[in-house]
Image: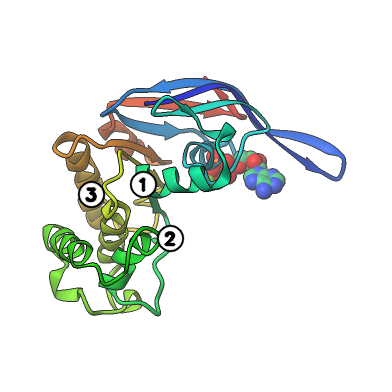
Amino acid sequence: MIKLLNVSKQYTLEDEVFFALKKVSLEIGEGEFIGIVGPSGCGKSTLMHLIGLLDRPTEGQVKILGRDVFTLQDEERSKMRNQVIGFVFQQFNLLNKLTVLENVLLPTIYTRSKTDVNHQDKARALLQRFGIEKQINSYPNKISGGQQQRVAIARALINNPKIILADEPTGNLDSQSGKVILDLLGTLNKNDKITVIIVTHDKEVAGKTKRQIRLKDGEIV
Ligand SMILES: Nc1ncnc2c1ncn2[C@@H]1O[C@H](COP(=O)(O)OP(=O)(O)OP(=O)(O)O)[C@@H](O)[C@H]1O
Ligand SMILES: [Mg+2]
């Protein structure tokens, strides 16, 4: 489902070349539940950005669903990002000017009208499933962090992604809310057969995943 071959990401800062990722090769199968772990600065978010098509590698090949994604036209790649991948971030990244429902519908505006009834129904069903139907017309800054993260997960799911990428999804939450989010991601993997990749510092969180990829100084160890 996801295949990286000799992927490197280098940054040049004041003439010094620095490798955030060094010749990383890995394969992630459909339905896997993966933890990406390692110390701060080892390249975890960089790896997520490449898999999520948010950034391009300096060298190497990234294949998603059999397609060599960085040879695609920008438009085709954006479409793939929007339709195949759902993102969950540490800081939730919800828009405070939009309601909970509008935030969940946001990824659908690129594909269809925001008022599309099917998307609305789907968004409501997701919010209900995650126990936040009462907050549907609230604004993100008026609900708890745990609730905000559940809204973010609903937003990640609205286009039926095959892959969820979560970068420190429990990092800003208390342990109880973190557990709810982790269980939810586990359920999406188990019941909904979504491939879930979680970046985490937390050993307990990593322990819930089925396979861990450990990075150190931009390399898999
Ligand atoms: N845009 C950039 N320009 C220059 N260097 C960068 C850039 N983005 C990341 N880096 C560097 O690349 C390395 C890997 O960064 P990355 O954000 O992937 O680490 P991380 O493992 O996610 O760390 P953390 O656990 O703190 O989030 C770091 O040394 C970082 O400073
Ligand atoms: Mg990071």
36, 70: nearer the viewer: 70
Horizontal and vertical percent for residue 8?
Answer: 64, 28
User: Where, by quadrant of the figure, is residue 21 drawn?
Assistant: top right
Q: In the drawing, does residue 123 fall left or right of residue 17? A: left
Mark 1 — residue?
83
Horizontal and vertical percent for residue 181?
Answer: 25, 51
Q: Is residue 40 visible?
A: no
User: Where, by quadrant of the figure, is residue 119 drawn?
Assistant: bottom left
| Disc 2 element | loop
Q: Earlier in the sequence, mark 3 or mark 2?
A: 2
User: Which residue corresponds to the image point at 15% horizontal and 64% vertical from the top-left?
Assistant: 121
| Disc 3 element | helix
Horizontal and vertical percent for residue 215?
Answer: 52, 28
User: Which residue corresponds to the image point at 33% horizontal and 34% vertical from the top-left?
Assistant: 206
Quadrant including the N terminus: top left
| Disc 1 element | helix
Ligand 1 image position (quadrant) = top right
Amino acid marked by disc 2: Gln
Q: Point out which mark residue 91 bears.
A: 2
Q: CA distance from mark 1 to mark 2?
A: 22 Å
Q: Earlier in the sequence, mark 1 or mark 2?
A: 1
Mark 3 — residue?
179
User: Which residue corresponds to the image point at 48% horizontal and 40% vertical from the top-left?
Assistant: 48
CB at mark 1 closer than 8 A to ligand 2?
no
Amino acid marked by disc 3: Lys
72, 42: nearer the viewer: 72
Say above or below: 105 vs 49: below
Amino acid marked by disc 1: Gln
Q: CA distance from mark 3 to mark 1?
A: 27 Å
150, 172: nearer the viewer: 150
